[in-house]
Amino acid sequence: MPEREAFVLGATGQIGRAAVQALAEDGWRVRAASRRGGRDPGWPEEVRSMAVDREEEGALTAAVGEGCDVLLDCCALQLRHGQQLSALADRIGSAVVVSSGGVYEDERGRSFATQGEPDGFPRYPVPVPETQRTVAPGDDDYGSRKAALERDLLAEGERLPVTLLRCAAVHGPHSRTPRELYFVRRWLDGRRVRLLAYRGESRFHPVHVANIAELARLAARQPGSRVLNAADPQAPTVAQMAQAVDDVLGWECETVLLEGAPPAAEPMLGRTPWSLPHPLVLDMSAAERELGYRAVTGYEESLPRTLHQLADTVRGRDWREVLPDMAEAYDPLGDYFGYAAEDRWLAERNGRSEHGS
Ligand SMILES: NC(=O)c1ccc[n+]([C@@H]2O[C@H](COP(=O)([O-])OP(=O)(O)OC[C@H]3O[C@@H](n4cnc5c(N)ncnc54)[C@H](OP(=O)(O)O)[C@@H]3O)[C@@H](O)[C@H]2O)c1
């Protein structure tokens, strides 16, 4: 491949770091743009990093300058971000845009946005193909905003070929919202018991950043207008994830299974960041067929680096201070580390079983 240029927006995020690396290794000249600039120490030095705030009028256009062969957008969250790319169609050969499985809705119109309602959690087919219906585009919530930008970009057709990558639950090093904190914080706290709602059988399909990067690399080589799921080869249950984490940490932790949802009086009991009442498992056959995608890693094999990097980040520190995005995303849901409530519940349960009820 003659040297071609890729422009990565959101390059210092968890996905961007891996994607810049994958594109550079594949022979692309890479411009790595993020709000504050900066670079990953692992990138080749030829990677050019730059500071660009896409919310500043004209900043992205100026940064793209005369153009690039592909633009990978890792931080497009709403319609106007898609419109920024459409406006650059004459200067971008093609685009790859990170989207989300959060756009899917089930046959009864239930999606992640309705999960707070009674019986509001979607029942998707297993696995979910890209042809599954999606929420109405709008500006009401994360899913409807992603749907709006997806639809807008797909309407560009040949004027701007765009691959939309609908990511599952992203994992890997340098996450600002690392779900694995649920296990790592407990390990660091010496907490030897954990509760898992829904019998630990929830499945919220993970995807490692290196697999997203691989999809982006393949899509960059094969421009087209398409939507593809982005997920790991396996979709383990929460109980399997917990065991895999213990194995990496060399740790033994008792797992107590709750039959169903967390109790109404203690809504955080057993609720991990993957604890869905019904599975979200993405079908990867279209990516395999259309791009020749083969995953480059899996959940278990990728865990050691993720866990050790996360442990180094939070050890001896207040996780809310070092991971403010995590606190913002998860604190409103309740306390994931409410050990006192767990101990009360376990003591009551033990009392109940001692009294034979
Ligand atoms: N986490 C999940 O489970 C999940 C699931 C499905 C889809 N997704 C999608 O994944 C994407 C997030 O990727 P990520 O996890 O790699 O993100 P991340 O780790 O939070 O990093 C965000 C990146 O975007 C940059 N950025 C943010 N605002 C910007 C702006 N105004 N102008 C220029 N750059 C900006 C950041 O730069 P600074 O560091 O300088 O701020 C950083 O490089 C989103 O599109 C999200 O919808 C995530």
Image (cartoon, helix red, strand yellow):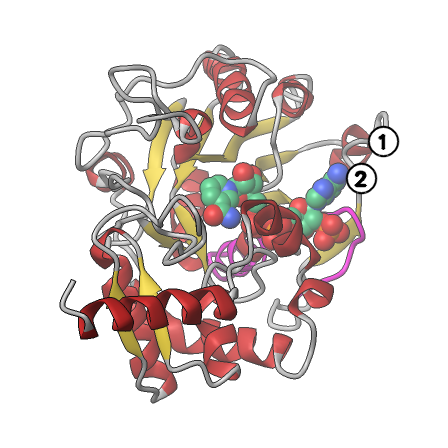
Tally of numbered discs? 2
Q: Is residue 152 magenta?
A: no
Give the residue number, with chain letter if any, for mark 2: 53
Measuring from the top left, give residue 262's x and y in whole percent: 35, 50
Does 120 sit above or below residue 334? above
Residue 8 makes an appearance in the image: yes
- Residue density around tag 2, few if under 14, some if 14–19, many if 20 or more, within 10 Å: some
Q: Is residue 36 magenta?
A: yes
Q: Quadrant of residue 221?
A: top left
Measuring from the top left, give residue 197's x and y in whole percent: 30, 54
Q: In the image, is the residue at mark 2 within 8 Å of ligand 1 by its beta carbon?
A: yes
Residue visible at 46% across and 26% down in the picture: 113
Judged from the image, the secondary structure of the residue bearing numbered disc 2 is loop
The C terminus lies in quadrant: bottom left
Q: Check disc 2 and give the amino acid type.
A: Asp
Q: Quadrant of residue 86?
A: top right
Front residue of 209 and 220: 209
- Residue density around tag 1, few if under 14, some if 14–19, many if 20 or more, within 10 Å: few
Query: Which label sits on residue 122?
Result: none
Q: In the image, is the residue at mark 1 within 8 Å of ligand 1 by its beta carbon?
A: yes
| Side of 226 where 107 appears, left or right | left
The CA distance from mark 2 to mark 1 is 6 Å
> Furthest-left residue in view?
356
Give the residue number, with chain letter if any, for mark 1: 56
Q: Specify the segment rendered in magenta.
A: 16-40
Does 9 sit above or below residue 228? below
* Residue contact at pointers 2 and 1, CB within 8 angstroms: yes
Measuring from the top left, give residue 91's x and y in whole percent: 66, 25
Residue visible at 76% across and 34% down in the picture: 54
Q: Check disc 1 and give the amino acid type.
A: Glu
Residue visible at 66% across and 72% down in the picture: 41
| Side of 348 where 173 appears, left or right | right
